[in-house]
Image: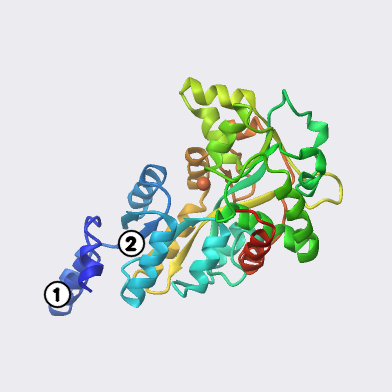
Amino acid sequence: MTFQWSALSSFSSPARASHVVLAASILGASMAASAAEEVNVYSARKEALIKPMLDRFTTDTGINVNLVTGSADALLRRLQVEGSASPADVFITVDAGRLYRAKKAGVLQPIQDAELESTIPANLKDSDDYWFGLSQRARVIFYNPKKVDASEFSTYEGLADAKWKGRICVRSSSNIYNQSLVASMIDADGKEATSKWLKGFVANFARPPFGGDTDLLKAVAAGVCDVTLANTYYFGRMGNSDKAKDQAVFNSLAIFWPNQAQGQRGAHVNVSGAGVTASAEHKENAVKLIRFLTSHEAQEWYAEVNNEYPVVKGIEPPKVLQNFGTFKADSLSLSVLGDNNRFAVELMDEAGWK
Ligand code: FE
């Protein structure tokens, strides 16, 4: 308990205060009216990318939001350590693979809510309603158009072709984004074909895996390799950057949407998402917050500041992404990415993807 509360120093008005007020209200009914409504959020998204929207939620509803931010893995560990004593009501993180881990770790609870059911496309939420997608990103091909012609590409599967030998840069297989991509390929192509594909793909690496998506985009721009895989928001961020260096990288790269032909499944997409914690003391407020995050206004803002695609249909993506053109997204239920994760990790390991 000591650990729990000392670790929570960043909460401006700890949930505990409401217990005090609640106890007082038993003695004097008039106190109840002054009990501040609140909801406690653990977010793997940086404060600047979420706080203004949470403030808007407070303005609209009168519910105070106490925000703790941190890395996705650290916050999940914290939820596990705190267990049923966790003050968190909502957990926000990125990648369906991670949301699946949170579900499996028992730190989330299912929420059957008619509104969330109808607003969020079924494939972009957990099939058992433990988490809900809030924004979408695609993990696609980025290349140097001076070295590669777009006609050379077709599918993710095509990247195992020998013509790409020594021309592909990727980040480590420990990265959840790559694991989720491979998990989607296992669903589409089966384990055996994916295992074979991985061996060919790994044989095409220009150098051992390194860096994050941004480093890889820079490496392609610098001529270290011709092709990489990255999430769309990293590219969008560079396009929106006021740094000349980022602009130069952005302008020297091109995007290719894989698996777009008739009958093909579409580009691999993933989400950032949120779930109500198993320990939530403010469950109702937690659901209200997730509903708010899928409102038209919040979807537009959230997508804009994160350079992502909204999950709710009918809402325009941010300008910088509109420049990339439209694409067909794989409609695979993202719950499958979690189910297939361990097979993906196994096969990547076997193929020598470090
Ligand atoms: Fe990322």
Say which amino acid is labelled 1. Ala
Mark 1 and mark 2 lie on one chain; the one further toward the N terminus is: 1
Residues at marks 1 and 2, CA–CA distance in whole angstroms: 22 Å
Front residue of 349 and 214: 349
Q: Quadrant of residue 170?
A: top right
Front residue of 221 and 59: 221
Residue contact between numbered discs 1 and 2, judged by CB atoms under 8 Å: no
Front residue of 287 and 222: 222
Residue lying at 62% horizontally and 53% vertically, measured from the top left: 178
Question: Residue 275: x, y in percent?
Answer: 47, 64
- Secondary-structure class at tag 1: helix
The residue identified by callout 1 is 24
Mark 1 beta carbon near ligand 1 (under 8 Å): no
Say which amino acid is labelled 2. Asn
As drawn, 95 above or below 304: below
Q: Is residue 222 left or right of residue 88?
A: right
As drawn, 62 above or below 260: below
As drawn, 268 above or below 233: below
- Secondary-structure class at tag 2: strand
The residue identified by callout 2 is 40
Q: Quadrant of residue 23?
A: bottom left
Residue lying at 32% horizontally and 55% vertically, measured from the top left: 67
